Image (spheres, helix red, strand yellow):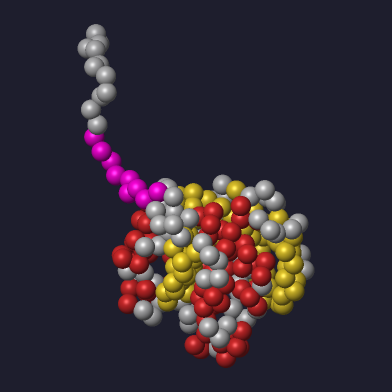
Amino acid sequence: MADKIRVTVWNENVHEKTHEEVRKMYPLGIHGAIAQYLAKQPDLEVRTATLDEPEHGLTESVLVETDVLTWWGHIAHGKVDDKVVARVQKRVLAGMGLIVLHSGHLSKIFRALMGTTGSLKWGAADEKERLWNLEPGHPITAGIGACIELPYEEMYGERFDIPTPDKLIFVSWFEGGAVFRSGCCWERGHGRIFYFQPGHETYPSLHNPEILRVITNAVRWARQRICIESTCVEVKPLEKISAKQM
Ligand code: ZN
């Protein structure tokens, strides 16, 4: 394994090109905002990839050099090539970490790894959100207090159609009354996966130092520790098996 954690920040990068409001909020793109923060961490080596690059910037060689992939997508989930999704899934099962952000709950890769629809209730009404920290001792909440308060976020509400998380890190309260499992951990194969809800494209959540701190912590938690492609192999018995009288 490399000394530094090699992170690839993936973004569909569509809203930034089509909506002035989003371009103003994220002039470097959502991927640029995340990558800029991560690149300041001495233990991380960061690159970005976007939908319109060949193979969406997620070629075999890029993925081989990636310990953790972060994923932001929204309106272009259907444009992500199934071959690339299969390649990413294979890498996660072999040990690569995956951080799925906000509307990535409907991405092909998240649904493939979860085996559920990823559907939820939503509403855009400039609501205040409080993300309650359920696991103050977990590496993902290092440096985070009892809760994170965001003045505005898009409401995501239950029921969120996911398998029960291996560990639930945050539960959110929204001003309008909804609650949501907003920070969830799973393992699939040898890979670690974290879903994190904040990050709507017209709100500054991905400039918020606490949100970026959680993403950074999650990258460290999900770092690839091993790379093993699991296959079925026939093995001979280690000991001599005595003939049985049937
Ligand atoms: Zn959104």
Quarter of the rendering containing residue 207 = bottom right
Q: Residue at x 49, y 52 (%)?
A: 192
Work out whether residue 2 can be spotted.
yes
Work out whether residue 174 can be spotted.
no
- Residue 87 image offset from top left, x and y in percent: 34, 61
Q: State the residue in front, 151 or 45.
A: 45
Position of residue 176 relative to residue 235, above or below, is below
- Residue 25 image offset from top left, x and y in percent: 61, 84
- Residue 120 image offset from top left, x and y in percent: 60, 63
Position of residue 210 relative to residue 239, above or below, is below
Horizontal side of residue 146 vs 157, given as left or right: right
- Residue 189 image offset from top left, x and y in percent: 42, 47
Position of residue 70 relative to residue 79, above or below, is above
Horizontal side of residue 46 vs 235, given as left or right: right
Marks counted in the figure total 0
Magenta span includes 185? no
The kind of secondary structure the magenta stretch mainly shows is loop
The quadrant the C terminus occupies is top left
Magenta span includes 232? yes
Q: Residue at x 46, y 76 (%)?
A: 12
Q: Residue at x 44, y 72 (%)?
A: 47
Q: Residue at x 56, y 47 (%)?
A: 166
Which span of residues is magenta-colored?
226-234
Horizontal side of residue 191 vs 241, given as left or right: right
